[in-house]
Every structure is written in structure tokens, then in C-alpha cells.
Image: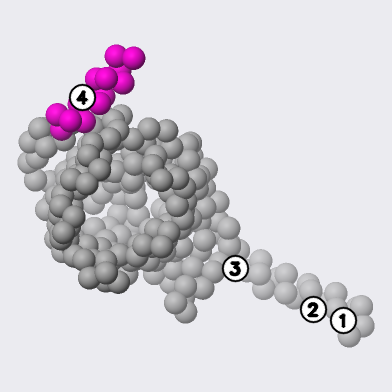
Amino acid sequence: MNRRMLLLVLAGAAAVFAADPLPSAESVLDRYVQVTGGKQAYEKRKTEIAHGTLEYASIGIKGSITRYAAEPDKYYAALDIEGLGKVEMGINGQVAWENSALLGPRVKTGLERAGAIREGSMNSTLNWRKLYPKVENAGIETIDGEECYKVVMTPGEGQPLIGYYQKKSGLQVKVTTVSSTQMGDIPVELIASDYKDFGGILEPAKVIQKAGPQEFTMTLESVEVNPVIPPERFALPADVRKLVDKAEAK
């Protein structure tokens, strides 16, 4: 191919790509809000109680999970896992905590605390601008045969969250990040599928999560929208309160 022909081909290719520019990360995230219910649907949701199941298929362990949330920053979840007992976690204002039958109570600090507060924020899908001050569309990747926009969301503290949103549907089908835990940084991957309408908002009924060598499936079964949740549901457990008081006394 001579140089003149090459320049002509390159010019044609440039014209094709210019006709289909990469959308901004902001527009991709706003579209996700829209296709899952819209701003008004999210704003109407002030409290919720979600019920689901948890399964570690490789080791044959199952459990149930109940999650409570209230605007703006109240969160509590209880997991009952066969053979391992109960695991509780929550956010009350700026305190993020966890309590389990095996490891006892602890208060999360540093990047782990920051990550827990983001994850537990009510209506985080709508309020992504508050949680991730920097977002970028990093290109297109194919997930299960569907082209997806790869959006990198960077919080004020902690590792970026990378979301994959289908070009056709606008739905988020995959998330990857590095989670800060008491055992160190762990790569995390979530695969979302089977979107269903739960009280006016589309949510994935099935999420497969891979955290390091562990893999489990979460299934969302029902969501109660705007129930009355007693304030004490979000109160710090006595054992956790002791840890907080001890830290504040130092």
C-alpha cells in the first residue's frame, strides 16, 4: 500500500471512530441510574430491608443474610452461616464495625473503614458523585460477549472501583477493586446478573463474588421499601461500644 493510500485509509478510520466517540464516565453512570429506575425512584427510597442467601458452593456452606439501611449513613447486616455462627457488621455515623462468633468484635479503621462506609451508603448508585470525586471512561471491554464501558471510579480514600457497563442495556455487569481488610489488600471481583425489579429499582438478584481464593454467590430474594426501622437497629453493640470508648479515651 502506497503512502497516499495509507493516509486515505487512516483518514477514513478516524472519521468512523469520530462518529461514535467514547461517552464520558459521568454519562455512563447517570445512564445506569436511569435504566435501573431513575433519580426519583432512588430519592423516594429512605429505608430498606433486604433478604437473601449466601452460598459457598465449593465447600457446601450456605447461609442467610438480612441487610438494613437508612439514609444517609446507617447500615446493618447480619449473616447466619451454617457451622460458623452469626456475623454482624454495620455503620453508625462514622463508625464502621464487625462482630462475629469466631473472631469477636472489632472497629474498622483507615482504608478499611473508608471502604465500608462507601459500600454501606444508602442509594450509593444515585450518589456516586459524592463517593467518587474522580471518574474516567477507560475504554471498552467485552464481558460474556457484550461490549461494556470500563469506568474507573476513584474515591477520596482507598483503591479505585472499576465498573463494567453494557453498551446496549446500560446495566453494570462486573466490578473489580482491591479491598483493604484486616488481612491486607485482597483483589475482589463481582459478577452481577439476573436484574429484577425490587420496589421500583432494578437490582441484580444474583452476584458472584471472588475475594482472593474464596468464591461465593449472593442471591437477593426480597426488598422491603421504606419500612419503619427502629433507631436501635443501628446502635453499636455493647462489645463494639466498649472498643470505641476505649479508643476515644486514649
Is the residue marked by circle 1 packed among few (<14), some (14-19), or many (20+) residues within 10 Å? few
Q: Which secondary structure lies at badge 3?
A: loop
Tell me, for residue 5, which label it has, or none: 1
Q: Which secondary structure lies at badge 4?
A: helix
**Residue corresponding to mark 2:** 9
Instruction: Report x, y in % for residue 15.
Output: 70, 71
- Residue 168 seen in the figure: yes
The answer for how far apart the CA atoms under marks 2 and 1 are is 6 Å
| Left or right of residue 101, residue 232 in this image | left
Corner quadrant of residue 239: top left
Q: Which residues are magenta?
A: 237-250
Q: Is residue 247 magenta?
A: yes
Tell me, for residue 242, which label it has, or none: 4
The kind of residue tagged 1 is Met
Q: Earlier in the sequence, mark 3 or mark 1?
A: 1
Q: Earlier in the sequence, mark 2 or mark 3?
A: 2
User: Looking at the figure, which quarter contains the N terminus?
Assistant: bottom right
Q: Which residue is nearer to you in this view: 38 or 175?
A: 175
Q: Which secondary structure lies at badge 2?
A: helix
The kind of residue tagged 3 is Asp
Q: Earlier in the sequence, mark 3 or mark 4?
A: 3
The answer for how far apart the CA atoms under marks 4 and 1 are is 76 Å
Q: Which secondary structure lies at badge 1?
A: helix
Numbered disc in front, either 3 or 4: 4
The kind of residue tagged 4 is Lys
Name the residue rendered at 7%, 36% in the picture.
230
| Left or right of residue 71, residue 21 in this image | right
